[in-house]
Amino acid sequence: MEERGQKLQHILHNAIDPKKVWGTSFGIQYQNQPWFGSSGNLSTQNQFFIASTTKLFVTAILLHLEAQKKLSLQDPIAKYLSQDILTGLHVLNNQDYSNQITLRNLLAHTSGIPDYFQQKNKSGKSLEMDILTGHDQSWTFEKCLEISKSISPKFIPNTPGKTHYSDTNFQLLGKIIENITSRSFVENLNEIILNPLELSNTYLYTDPTDNRPQKMYYKNKVMDIPLAMSSFGPDGGMVSTSPDLLKFIIAFFTGKLFPISFLNYLEVWNKLFFPLEAGVGIQRFKLPWILNPMGTIPVIMGHSGLSGALAYYCPEKDLYIAGTVNQIAFPDTSFRLSIKLIQSALK
């Protein structure tokens, strides 16, 4: 493992790019042997924002609650949400489809609900671009709904073959978790995942004065956006380290958080952002044969985030990888680096 570790570390050092990547932190487990490495301005103990990789924690909580018979993914969301939340949530061609949406639709991004964060509103602006151009701001769950309801849905819920990535889906799932358990999302996160797995460096970022996480980069600019990061909550507001994130992704796929048989229900794939596909609460990275003729880039499942963080599992090789490149502007960077690390680890 020592020689393999040196090769992996060399890859991380070479990933540092004065225009794109200022720091990396990764963990890999292969053949039950973990390895951790870092480069640039990150160490393996540095905490970083994992952005939408947070969604994988939400998936785990919901599956845990399903195992306890507290919910079914087939349940309509109307069973758990108040009428003021439901009204106008999904109105397409003057017909309200809000009552047809299930928990599974939210998890799989098959609800058709607009994305409050990345989609443009009627004035042609998105909350994402407003923040990335320097306007740090905070928002509430109610504001997310207000923005989402002002944008037209993409399709009728559960339309075959249709997916639309929406952070609003996971804002709603966070609220549903709270309503079902009569506990805050943070309390559920701690009780179901963080405390049992002893993830002491992982938490939901809620305090804008908290300076523990490494600041992210957008191109060559440091992004100091604590108000925004403290507002994402269940759709992308968590902080972790590469050792903690690796421990979590292993637990997710080995039945430590919910019955391992539940994984079969998650692997229903629809096109998302090439080459990512959406499952039910998880993602799959799979290159077509024409781009991977030798099959040297394996299929991996898990989730990634806009911050350059990711956590994935390769079933074919029983390999796990988690980490970050801490860069918002170039979303393919973390995948390209992960592929190099995976290929090197498998040699």
Image (cartoon, grey):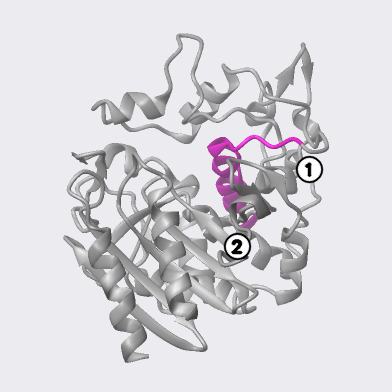
Q: Going by the image, does 335 lie left or right of 178?
A: left
Q: Residue at x 38, y 50 (%)?
A: 333
What percent of the width, then of the height, locates residue 104?
74, 49
Task: Sort mark 1 into few (<14), some (14-19) or many (20+) by Cα contacts within 10 Å.
Answer: some
Q: Amino acid at mark 2?
A: Met
Image quarter of residue 169: top right
Q: Which residue is mark 2?
A: 301
- 163 relative position to 38: left or right: right
Q: Secondary structure at mark 1?
A: loop
Q: Residue at horizontal 26%, vertical 72%?
A: 10
- Circle 2 — which element? strand
Q: Nearer the viewer, residue 271 or 130?
A: 271
Dominant SS in magenta: helix
Hey, which quadrant is residue 171 in on the image?
Answer: top right
In this rendered view, identify the residue nearer to me: 333 or 277. Answer: 333
Residue 184 in view, yes or no: no
Residue 163 appears at what percent x and percent y? 69, 37
288 above or below 137?
below
Q: How many numbered markers are drawn?
A: 2
| Mark 2 residue crowding within 10 angstroms, few (<14) / some (14–19) / many (20+) | many
Identity of the amino acid at label 1? Answer: Pro
**Is 169 within the magenta?**
yes
In the image, residue 91 above or below residue 304: above
Can see residue 40?
yes
Which numbered mark, 1 or 2, is in the foreground of this view? 2
Query: At x 52% / y 70%, what residue is drawn?
Result: 249
What is the quadrant of the N terminus in the image?
bottom left
Q: Earlier in the sequence, mark 1 or mark 2?
A: 1
Q: Residue at x 22, y 49 (%)?
A: 215
Write down the region rendered in magenta: 162-181
Q: Which residue is mark 1?
A: 76
